[in-house]
Amino acid sequence: MNIYLAVLGIATIFSAFSQVLLKQSARREHRSWIYEYLNWRVITAYGIAFAVLFANTWAYTGVDMRFGPVIDTFTYVFVMIFSFVLLKEHFTKGQLIGNLIIIAGVLIYTL
């Protein structure tokens, strides 16, 4: 397997995880407005997003440009999965259909 594709895939998973961390922080009550932004979830999420930016930049040096955005669309699928597992959210029929369309589009595009 191409190491660049692996980094791009792992970065996609981390990107989805950082979005779930931000959502966890948004759901909580904070003592004041400053704690909405200066808590471990927000700082960690933005740190992950910053690291993903560099990982994606490096990975695009070895991946054909037509595959990068396709792999990156899996972020939506991972966000739905992480929200279900970590946040105990239930997804709607529309969200499920939307994610199945994303997966089908990726399969059609890559085959």
Image (cartoon, rainbow, N blue to C red):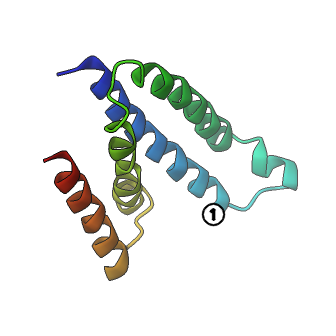
Q: Residues within 10 Å of mark 1 (few under 14, many from 20)?
A: few
Q: Secondary structure at mark 1?
A: helix
Judge by depth and name the residue closer to the eye, 2 or 77: 2
Residue 2 coordinates in the image, percent (x, y): 22, 20
Name the one closer to the observer, 59 or 81: 59
Tag 1: amino acid: Arg
Q: How many marks?
A: 1
Q: What residue lies at 40% left-to-right and 49% top-to-bottom?
A: 75
Q: Is residue 99 left or right of residue 72?
A: left
Q: Quadrant of residue 64?
A: top left
Residue 56 seen anywhere in this rendered image of the structure? yes
Residue at (46% x, 19% y) in the render: 58
| x and y percentages locating residue 20 in the rendered image | 51, 52
Residue 68 sits above or below residue 107 on the image:
above
The one of 102 and 17 positioned closer to us in this rendering? 102
Vertical side of 37 occupied by 96: above or below? below
Q: Residue furthest left?
A: 111
Residue 92 makes an appearance in the image: no
Q: Is residue 37 left or right of residue 88?
A: right
Residue 45, image x, y percentages:
59, 39
- Residue drawn at (34%, 38%), measured in percent from left and top? 66
Quadrant location, the N terminus: top left
Where is residue 91 drawn, in percent x and y?
37, 73
Name the image quarter holding residue 53.
top right
| Residue to which mark 1 is pinned | 27
Judge left or right: residue 41 versus residue 90. right
